[in-house]
Image (cartoon, helix red, strand yellow):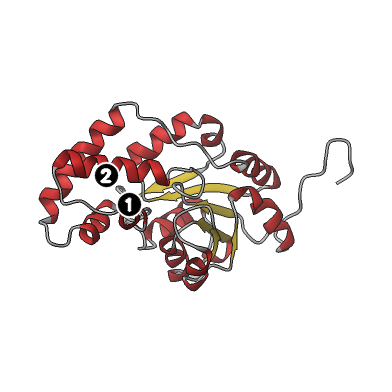
């Protein structure tokens, strides 16, 4: 097995949440009376830490006060029991397959710890398959590779034995920075060409295709059907 540890981004990679994130941000902008921004401008920044998002959306505003306003709004949004984004079709089945082959599964996300924990409580069948995770508010935010370094250290795996799977150039940049392979998924916010230019070894449509891609790459073999010889 080439890749012992498979590290997944969350939003846009496992969860079909881009529309929900944009809507929530637009609601916050409106509710706080901030200058309006286009949906696409927000969508482009999904995956980055909040400080970086705000600096790019509102470079003319004082960042500390703006962050405090947005954090307060986000806390209310999370506590309101807002609809949780669904997983992309086939994602949970693919991850079950990969765990059965012996891969370890981790998450590296721009979400807050509170936000990820909330998502994992909702998707409990996925949560039980994950061995470790890092969030933007407990380490350096993407594209800084620190969260990947911490996951590798915690799991005792070298960068060459891990694979980062994500939907943005920020995910690919993290992996590239530490010599880790990156695999793009086309279901999220950045297009396949952009992912490849950022260093993706390949781009698949969704995580559902990952077991087949790994098998074709010679990483691991699929499980035999019940009753067949291994």
> Picture coordinates of residue 101 (x, y %)?
70, 47
Picture quadrant where residue 116 is located: top left
Residue at position x 39%, y 62% from top?
145
Q: Residues within 10 Å of mark 1 (few under 14, many from 20)?
A: few
> Picture coordinates of residue 73 (x, y %)?
21, 37
User: Which one is in front, 150 or 214?
Assistant: 214
Numbered mark located on residue 178 in the image: none
Q: Is residue 171 left or right of residue 104?
A: left
Does residue 215 lie above or below 89 as drawn? Answer: below
Q: Residue furthest bottom?
A: 197
User: Which one is in front, 47 or 28?
Assistant: 28
Kindly identify which residue carries mark 2: 26
> Picture coordinates of residue 140 (x, y %)?
31, 57
Does residue 4 lie above or below 126 as drawn? Answer: below
Total number of numbered discs in the rendering: 2
Residue at position x 48%, y 44% from top?
132
Q: CA distance from mark 2 to mark 1?
A: 8 Å
Picture quadrant where residue 223 is located: top right
What secondary structure is found at the residue carrying circle 2?
helix
> Picture coordinates of residue 186 (x, y %)?
54, 57
What secondary structure is found at the residue carrying circle 1?
helix
Q: Is residue 1 left or right of residue 225?
A: left
Q: Which quadrant is the N terminus positioned in? A: bottom right
The mark nearer the N terminus, 2 or 1, is: 2
Instruction: Check contact, mark 2 vs mark 1: CB within 8 A.
Output: yes
Kindly identify which residue carries mark 1: 39
Residue at position x 44%, y 55% from top?
189
Q: Residues within 10 Å of mark 2 (few under 14, many from 20)?
A: some
């Amino acid at each position: 097995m080439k890749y012992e540890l498979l590290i997944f981004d969350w939003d846009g990679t496992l969860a079909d949440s881009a529309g929900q994130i944009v809507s929530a941000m637009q609601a916050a902008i409106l509710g706080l009376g901030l200058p309006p921004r286009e949906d696409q401008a927000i969508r482009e920044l999904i995956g980055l830490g909040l400080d970086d998002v705000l600096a790019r959306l509102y470079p003319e505003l004082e960042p500390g006060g703006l962050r405090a306003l947005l954090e307060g709004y986000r806390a209310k949004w999370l506590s309101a029991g807002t609809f949780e984004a669904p997983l992309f079709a086939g994602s949970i089945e693919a991850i079950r397959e990969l765990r059965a082959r012996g891969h370890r599964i981790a998450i590296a996300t721009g979400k807050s710890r509170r936000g990820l924990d909330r998502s994992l409580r909702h998707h409990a069948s996925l949560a039980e398959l994950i061995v470790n995770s890092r969030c933007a508010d407990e380490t350096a935010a993407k594209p800084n590779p620190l969260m990947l370094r911490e996951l590798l250290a915690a799991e005792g795996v070298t960068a060459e034995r891990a694979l980062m799977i994500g939907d943005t150039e920020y995910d690919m940049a993290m992996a590239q920075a530490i010599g880790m392979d990156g695999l793009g998924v086309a279901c999220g916010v950045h297009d396949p060409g952009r992912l490849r230019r950022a260093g993706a070894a390949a781009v698949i449509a969704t995580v559902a295709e990952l077991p087949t891609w790994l098998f074709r790459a010679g990483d691991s073999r699929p499980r035999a059907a019940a009753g067949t010889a291994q």
